[in-house]
Image (spheres, helix red, strand yellow):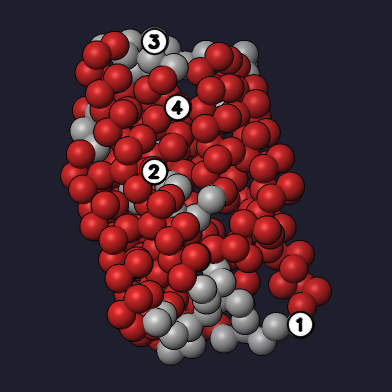
Amino acid sequence: MQIWQAIILGAIQGFTEFLPVSSSGHLILVERLLGVTTDGGLFFDIMLHIGTLVPVFIVFFKSITGLFKKPYNKLLYLAVASLPAAAAGFLFQDKIETLFKGGEILSAVLLAVSFSVTAAELLFAEKISEKNKNTLPLSLKSSIIMGVFQGFAIIPGLSRSGTVITGGAVAKLNGNDNAEFAFLMSIPVILGASAVSGVKVATSGCVIEPVPVIFGVITAAVTGYIAVNVMLNAIKKAKFKRFSVYLIVIAAASVLIKVLFGV
């Protein structure tokens, strides 16, 4: 992998991890276009995800430290919300990745469908937020709902952040709590996925290229910081139409690229 490729992938990861457009879906698409793969691998992918956690810890430092103060309610909510994604990842992750990362036209169509579903759910989230005037505080009920929604986001193209905030909107959670908890929920998911991938790396004997990794991680952290702040504002205002329009365009592009260029 070249440094410029690592920078591009780092930027894609950083921006799309927190914007509701699906980082996994974009990485699959961009890797096809660049003719590279992170398989050599998984270590690069792990480090990009760790890089995107840096801005979360910076922006939400007080909220994160507050998790460990009595009465520990929010820590409990976070643990409960993380369970569905952990179960879904354990049961289905490998099968789903194989299906979506195949070279057939089917994989491109499935990716396009997932992008389109994310676009639809964002429009739904905006509509019900405007209708219900969401004002409820975070609770065990809302954390369970958001956790269940997050469990579906193991599907590439189905945005984790978009799916989670849609769950918050369904639970009638107020914008501030929805935004904060959606980002807090990213921490155990990213750390857990990185740990699982780390075990695979340790047993695979893959060769690690340190320089591209460093550039990729730095880029992911910087772009992730920008994305966090953009998304915070969008969630609080429940304005997602622009993301939906973008997702419809990228859904069509993912199929056209496959049909026209075979990648």
**Disc 4 target residue:** 167
Label 2 sits on residue: 117
Say which residue label 1 marks.
Answer: 205
Q: CA distance from mark 3 to mark 4?
A: 13 Å
Which of the 4 quarters of the picture holds residue 78?
top right
Query: Circle 3 sits in a helix, a strand or a loop, which is it?
Result: loop
Specify few, some or many for label 4: CA neighbours under 10 Å numbering under 14, 14-19, or 20 or more.
many
For the residues labelled 1 and 3, the Cα–Cα distance comes to: 49 Å
Looking at the rendered image, the disc whose residue lies closer to the viewer, 2 or 1, is 2
Q: Which residue type does callout 3 highlight?
A: Leu
The earlier-in-sequence mark between 2 and 3 is 2
SS class, disc 2? helix
Return the disc, 1 or 3, that comes first in the chain's sequence. 3
* Residue type pointed to by label 1: Gly
Q: Is residue 43 above or below residue 168?
A: below
Of badges 4 and 1, the one in the foreground is 4
- Coordinates of residue 177 in the picture (x, y in percent): 39, 23
Residue appearing at x 32%, y 38% in the figure: 120
Q: Which mark is residue 262?
A: none
Earlier sequence position, callout 4 versus callout 2: 2
Q: Position of residue 142 (x, y in %)?
A: 51, 18
Where is residue 125, by image quadrant? Answer: top left
In this view, the residue in front, 5 or 159, is 159
Q: Secondary structure at mark 4?
A: helix
Asked if residue 1 shows in the view, the reply is yes
> Given contact means CB atoms under 8 Å apart, are the residues at marks 1 and 3 in contact?
no
Give amino acid for label 2.
Val
Mark 2–mark 1 distance (CA, rounded to whole Å): 38 Å
- As measured in the structure, the alpha-carbon distance from the residue carrying label 4 to the one carrying label 1 is 40 Å
Mark 2 → mark 3, Cα distance in angstroms:
26 Å
Residue picked out by circle 3: 136
